[in-house]
Image: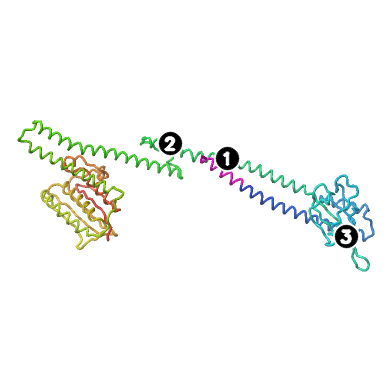
Amino acid sequence: MKSFYQRQFLLMAGMVLTSFALLSSAFITLSYQYTIQDKRDSMERNAEFIADFTAAVQSSGLSLMDSSYQAYVSSISRISDAYVIICQPNGRVILASEGTFRDGVAAPTVPEAICKELEATGDYSGMTTLEGLFNESRYVAGRSVTLSDFSGKTYETNLVFVAADTSSITELWRAVASIFFFTALCVVFIAFICSALTSRRQTRPMHEIAEMARKFGHGEMDARVTGYEDRQDEVGELAEAFNTMAESLAQSEARRTEFISNISHELKTPMTTIAGFADGILDGTIPPEKEKEYLKTISSETRRLSRLVRRMLDLSRLRSSQNVTAQETFDIVELMLRVLVSLEPRATARHLDVETHLPDGSVMVWGDPDAITQVCYNLLDNAVKFASEGSTIGIAIAAKAGKARVSVRNSGETIPPEELSLLFDRFHKSDRSRSMDRDGVGLGLYIVKTILGNHKENITVTSENGITEFTFTLTLA
């Protein structure tokens, strides 16, 4: 398996080499075309100059063997770094600059085909060795020497060829190739160093995150990735996301542990009471005249266990992935009044007054009527249970911005701010509620939160100066 560093280095090196290959190919092609064209133009101009000068020399009656003419040809050869050949129309060479032909050529003759082509067209150009006269291919440009007689008729007397050595072009290509490969090696080496540094910077935190993940998977819930809080890049974001996930999982594990502890406590207390009183009746420890009183306690604890099991089944149903909330329209005002009527005997027994702020008409909302009935019942039941005797319970419903806001308020003891966020946890009870609420199991508000969560709705709670208020929302139909 290739590492992140290997993949990054290969990608970078491939991009660098590809870029250099494309650039060098384009440069060599352009330089070759430019050099060849420059050589072609230069050789053709030189051939033209020599042909014109030769024609002038012959017209003046001078011989081509004249020293001044040969000096001119020699000067042109040295200045243009080229070889000059003067030959007759049949190809026999009359004059050639020094070093033109390869060693061993006694009587050099220009190939007949080239001479005929030059006579036919008036010029010639191409890469050739003149059938072995040169050691290697050279660029050759040719012109015919044209003279005019007294009648104005033109005729060709000699042929002029100028040949350029292509070794300079070859040397240029070799220099370009050397520079390319040397530069490419330097750039790849620099890329190797930069890739190593950047990859190490990128892979080190990934290794640390992977190590923290393994530790977390082995049960070390306090494992966190540190040292990347100030990095404003993807690595810092990944480390932050991992820590957030780890914190969430740690809290979930803590809640699971607390849940098991709480349910064990809730089950153990009534079962211990039932077993103790039952054993006391059976072995005669409890007098017969008190058996009825203790049997009532056993019955009460048994019903408490039944309520706990029923609430646990409700939670299982609500949290099931197969649970789909039925969506239909209903009147939340009518539903709240029905729940209030069902709790009227309990409110009357505690001498509680009810203050309502309800709209005159209906407030139609979307949701599961049975589930929302349970929400309203649990909130009103808690309000009656924890309200100070003789105080007032408040109920308010208002429609605003596409939502119905339902509030339930009571007067009693103020809930500490640190406990407000815990009220909706499973089995959460404050110390005062444990002493006042022997019938509660600490699941009512958790069920409320779960039902509203299934409806994609929110619930909030405030508690100040003895006034505790729960408010939840429903979508208007």
Q: Earlier in the sequence, mark 3 or mark 2?
A: 3
Q: How many marks?
A: 3
Residue 392, placed above or below residue 436 = below
Q: Between marks 3 and 2, how big is the CA–CA gap?
A: 89 Å
Q: Earlier in the sequence, mark 2 or mark 1?
A: 1
Camera-nearest label, 2 or 1: 2
For residue 325, which numbered disc appears in the image? none
Instruction: Read off the residue under disc 1.
Output: 192
- The answer to whether mark 2 and mark 1 are in CB contact below 8 A is no
For residue 145, which numbered disc appears in the image? 3
Instruction: Read off the residue under disc 2.
Output: 211
Q: Is residue 194 magenta?
A: no
Name the residue type under label 3. Answer: Val
Q: Which residues are magenta?
A: 1-17
Name the residue type under label 2. Answer: Glu
Q: Residue furthest left?
A: 289
Residue 31 point in image, percent of width and height: 71, 51
SS of the residue under disc 3: strand
Residue 366 point in image, percent of width and height: 27, 58
Residue situated in front as seen by the camera: 472 or 274: 274
SS of the residue under disc 1: helix
Q: For this view, does 52 lie left or right of residue 211?
A: right
Residue 70, placed above or below residue 227 = below
